[in-house]
Amino acid sequence: MDTIILKSLGGAETVTGSKHLLKTSELNILVDCGLFQGIKSLREQNWEPLHVDVAEIDIVILTHAHLDHCGYIPLLVKNGFKGKIYMTEPTKELAKLILLDSAKLQEEDAEKANYHHYTKHNPAKPLYTIHDAEKSFKQFFTVSENSFIKLSTHIQCRFKPCGHIIGACSVEIVFFEKTIIFSGDIGRTHSAILPPPDFFTKADFIVMESTYGDRLHDNTNLYDKLEHWINLTVKNHGNIIIPSFAVGRAQELIYILYQLKEQNRIPYNLPVIMDSPMAASATDIMVEYAEYTTVNKEKWLEIIEQMNINREYADTAEIIHDKQSKIIIAGSGMIIGGRVLEYLKHDVGNRRNTVLIVGFQAEGTRGRALLNESHELKIHGKYYPVKANVVELTGLSAHADQSELIEWIKNFEQPLQQIMLVHGEPSAQEALRVKIQTELQIPVKILIKDKEFVL
């Protein structure tokens, strides 16, 4: 029997918590295994049991290493998953880094909650521990891109780079005569540091991301906009704060800023500070796997040498109180935590400063609040007025926009039976659904969490 059932356990009608279960007569395959992030109602879903018996999942396929795609793995293993977890080599190294950091933060949060008695649980416990994360690494298996891997008698899969971050791939799964593509997160056509997304040309079904399904990124020159806001802020004796995702975005930023200095478009002696231990470690991995980028290893080492990379939290206060204008790159990318909060406490209330928003900001995050022109930010229980310039630069997004998603679909040479949209907020998904059906005449379904769909 070759019936296939698709069931999203997360990442349906939202951009976070990606987990898509493919049930076949031979194997049950979970594609991605991410944590929910953002508003409280989403984060609370991490604590709820999956609507599937974990023991019935045979294999996990990981498209890339961002937390909303890999962050649930230690809990899945803790709850009884014993199968292999397939991914590319760079994804393995980045996933280890991200999962250890996630476990550490959860342990620290539980410890603080118990110490300060602000938890209704007695005692508060982490979702998983560092030990749980390390235990899950034993089930990591790496694969080569563009090569078929036999998973069972009639099932094989193939990874193809999708340009989102290093190691990120779309995945093709072939079962009997049916081909299902999981797009993963599709990157930009023109990235400063990554090759453009590769693509498949044949499929019956596509499970496709829709993060920017309702938007076109700003096509004005990104370098010009960065040059303008940096020089304007320096002229006003202010600081440029860039909340950044540690993996992918931070590395692209330091490369572009290096280029702007080399071209004498911003002051050569303007300090660029990466205040993020995880971004620093992710940059080390980027250098190690430089062949996955469009920049050679020697150039990466030259760029890093010109950076001020701060790994120690104790040094953050000293950087903050330095009166010299500077560019700060710090996590987290959606301003939900991390060292960027310390900089915003001091800088967001000053009109001389600029906050550059360079990535997707989920509902309920401080980053989304800034884009929505909120007059204040709540940080660590206190409200801070927003007076700094807040500028969104969509040209630095690691996600394809609507036109790039449509062009990705157009690479398929034969008619598709169905596209299933995931990883997007409802407005983005609906806009993309209508666009695909109208322009390409392909049936589109928006997947709903925990509802089964027969392919």
Image: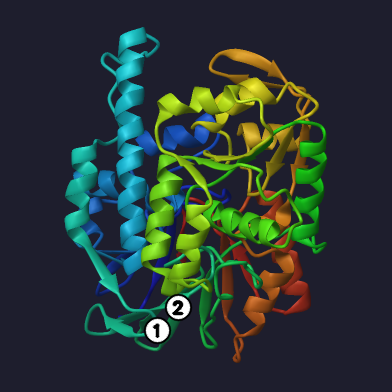
Task: From the viewer's perspective, tell me whether residue 274 is left or right of residue 242.
Answer: left
Spot occupied by residue 337 in the image (x, y as percentages of width and height)? 50, 31
Q: Which residue is mark 1?
A: 146
Q: Residue at x 79, y 53 (%)?
A: 225
- Looking at the rendered image, the quarter that the N terminus falls into is bottom left
Element class at badge 1: loop
Q: Quadrant of residue 159?
A: bottom left
Instruction: Let me know if residue 361 appears in the view.
Output: yes
Circle 2 residues within 10 Å: few <14, some 14–19, many ≥20: many
Instruction: Let me know if residue 79 appears in the view.
Output: no
Spot occupied by residue 130 in the image (x, y as percentages of width and height)? 23, 38
Q: Which residue is mark 2?
A: 160
Q: Quadrant of residue 440?
A: bottom right
Spot occupied by residue 271 in the image (x, y as percentages of width and height)? 61, 42
Alpha carbon separation for disc pair 2 and 1: 5 Å
Vertical side of 103 occupied by 110: above or below: above
Task: From the viewer's perspective, tell me whether residue 16 is left or right of residue 370.
Answer: left
| Amino acid type at image mark 2 | Lys
Spot occupied by residue 141 in the image (x, y as percentages of width and height)? 23, 67
| Amino acid type at image mark 1 | Asn
Task: From the viewer's perspective, tell me whether residue 66 is left or right of residue 418.
Answer: left
Extreme residue toward the top, this view:
117
